[in-house]
Image (cartoon, rainbow, N blue to C red):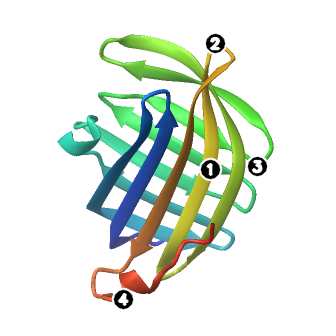
């Protein structure tokens, strides 16, 4: 797979007991497409609270795998309509969590594109938040990023 430099925009919305929280990050990253799979990665920053961690996405037609390596370690597997469990490791300790993916929307090609995942996050089989994140991957020379509208 040939990897290239891209700009990755991530918007995460978490609806928990304290109300909705939004995190936005625009960062350089790497991106590649091979047949029906896409891969992209970026370095986390202080804004996300995970500085020293590399986040990568492996996108297949029916599955998205998010891996974090470094200060925070985890591997989350998103599959529509299916619950998956994962170990979330931080410098403070580890915990087993679950995620139940409601919907995955993805349009990625060799030039970039977007992905949206809607899921519930569980701790000890109790839903603690409803989450959605949007990711836009674009080549650095593109300036029409505002033209992309999220399907709701």
> Within 10 angstroms of label 3, few (less than 14), some, or many (20 or more) residues?
some
As measured in the structure, the alpha-carbon distance from the residue carrying label 4 to the one carrying label 2 is 43 Å
Quick one: which residue is furthest to the right in this view?
81
As measured in the structure, the alpha-carbon distance from the residue carrying label 1 to the one carrying label 3 is 9 Å
What numbered label is drawn on residue 118?
Answer: 1
Please name the residue that numbered disc 3 is placed on: 80
> Within 10 angstroms of label 2, few (less than 14), some, or many (20 or more) residues?
few
Q: Secondary structure at mark 3?
A: loop
Please name the residue that numbered disc 2 is placed on: 124
Residue 57 image offset from top left, x and y in percent: 51, 52
Q: Secondary structure at mark 4?
A: loop
Please name the residue that numbered disc 4 is placed on: 144
As measured in the structure, the alpha-carbon distance from the residue carrying label 2 to the one carrying label 3 is 21 Å
As measured in the structure, the alpha-carbon distance from the residue carrying label 2 to the one carrying label 1 is 20 Å
Residue in view at x 73 percent, y 46 percent: 79
Work out whether residue 39 or residue 64 is closer to the camera in this orientation and state it. 64
Work out whether residue 96 or residue 68 is closer to the camera in this orientation and state it. 96
First-in-chain label (3 vs 4): 3
Q: Secondary structure at mark 1?
A: strand
First-in-chain label (2 vs 1): 1
């Amino acid at each position: 797979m040939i990897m290239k430099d891209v700009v990755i925009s991530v918007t995460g919305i978490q609806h928990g007991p304290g109300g909705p929280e939004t995190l936005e990050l625009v960062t350089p990253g790497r991106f590649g497409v091979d047949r029906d799979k896409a891969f992209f990665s970026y370095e986390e920053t202080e804004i996300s609270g995970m500085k020293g961690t590399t986040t990568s996405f492996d996108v297949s037609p029916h599955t998205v795998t998010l891996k974090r390596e470094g200060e925070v370690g985890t591997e989350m597997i998103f599959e529509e309509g299916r619950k998956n469990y994962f170990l979330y490791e931080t410098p403070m300790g580890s915990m087993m969590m679950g995620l139940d993916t409601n919907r995955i929307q993805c349009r990625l090609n060799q030039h970039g594109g977007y992905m949206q995942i809607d899921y519930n996050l569980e701790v000890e089989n109790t839903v603690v938040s409803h989450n959605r994140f949007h990711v836009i991957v674009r080549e650095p020379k593109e300036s029409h990023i505002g033209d992309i509208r999220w399907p709701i």
